[in-house]
Image: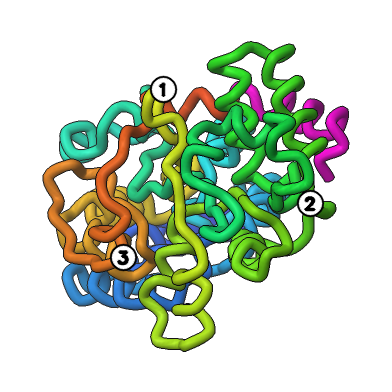
Amino acid sequence: MSTISRALAALFICAASVASVHAADEAVLNLYSARHYKTDEALYENFTKATGIRINRIEASDEQLVERLKSEGAASPADLLLIVDAARLWQAQQLGLFRPVESALLTDRVPARFRDPAGNWFGFSYRARVIVYNKAMAKPGDVATYASLADPANKGRVCVRSGSHPYNLSLISAQIAHLGEARAEAWAKGVVANFARMPKGGDTDQIKAVAAGECAVALSNSYYYARLMRSTQAADREIVARTGIVFPDQNGVGTHVNISGAGVLKHAPHRDNAIKFLDYLASNDAQRYFADGNNEWPVVPSVVVANPALDALGKFKIDPLPIADFGKHTAEAQKIADRADWR
């Protein structure tokens, strides 16, 4: 290599190093998020006001974001992945997408059941998988457990979304953890045998179908029902008036819950900013945003929220199964859903 070539190479390396340092010091956070809630805007704005760190967001589904990160590899500009299902967090972890974080604040504030033991990801809000029932067609005692959804007494009475959706896969995964694969598959087949119709739509559609009498009971995440409770629309209030909800298995292991959670990515160019954002998400203010904005429960036990819908739903016993365990059974859960014809 000539003297001129060596000089140019040295200059290029120096410039690249300066650019890398500048990127790391830049007051920016590149966030890949599967949360599509307008109410989260206040969450992000408050962080920027408090820290001066500007948030750039790319929003897509959990699965799309994971696939994008796999494709981008080491060249990914993303600093943080925020998604709405524990099994997807576990999948991203298995793909090596995260770099563990050691944070005394997060370890202290986020209960162990809501985070990865190695610090790959942390949950920041949770929602319950509840059973909605039509007051004129069913009683709470008819669906006091998840097992009751497979009881022949409820034949032709159950509405639910696709078995391949992460919310249902995580529930099936929990059933596998509690019952073993054979009994979990028998349960899934029993649920399918009780369908009032083939799965279609999202959780809100299931609630509406129950209110309309298309089915007597349905599975739904709690925040969908809470949204209807807080709505000022007459049609939504009528839906709530015709229906009620049950927190299943209160006399057993407790109700299944899932989380929204986040982890710092392996190739994050602004790692320090990403950790600051994680710490912020565990703050009292951010925890209240989750509760007030999207009707989810904060994971930090000491946080007190004033949400009329959550207050009306009341306290309930949570299944103590560690959230991290869901992902271990997701592949088998999908196979069970397929074999049960829960499409």
Q: Secondary structure at mark 3?
A: helix
Residue designated by label 1: 253
- The way the protein has been coloured in the rendering is rainbow
Q: Which sits earlier in the primary sequence, circle 2 or circle 3? A: 2
Q: Where does the image place residue 14, in percent across and percent down from the top left? A: 45, 56
Q: What label does residue 309 carry, if any?
A: 3
Specify start and end residues of the magenta stretch as a single range: 328-343
Q: Secondary structure at mark 2?
A: loop
Up the image or down, 148 lies above or below 81; here it is above
Mark pair 1, 2: CA separation: 27 Å
Dividing the picture into quadrants, the one containing residue 70 is: top right
Which circle, 2 or 3, is nearer the viewer? 2
Q: Residues within 10 Å of mark 2 (few under 14, many from 20)?
A: many
Q: Residues within 10 Å of mark 3 (few under 14, many from 20)?
A: some
Magenta span main SS: helix
Between 244 and 30, the one nearer to me in the picture: 244
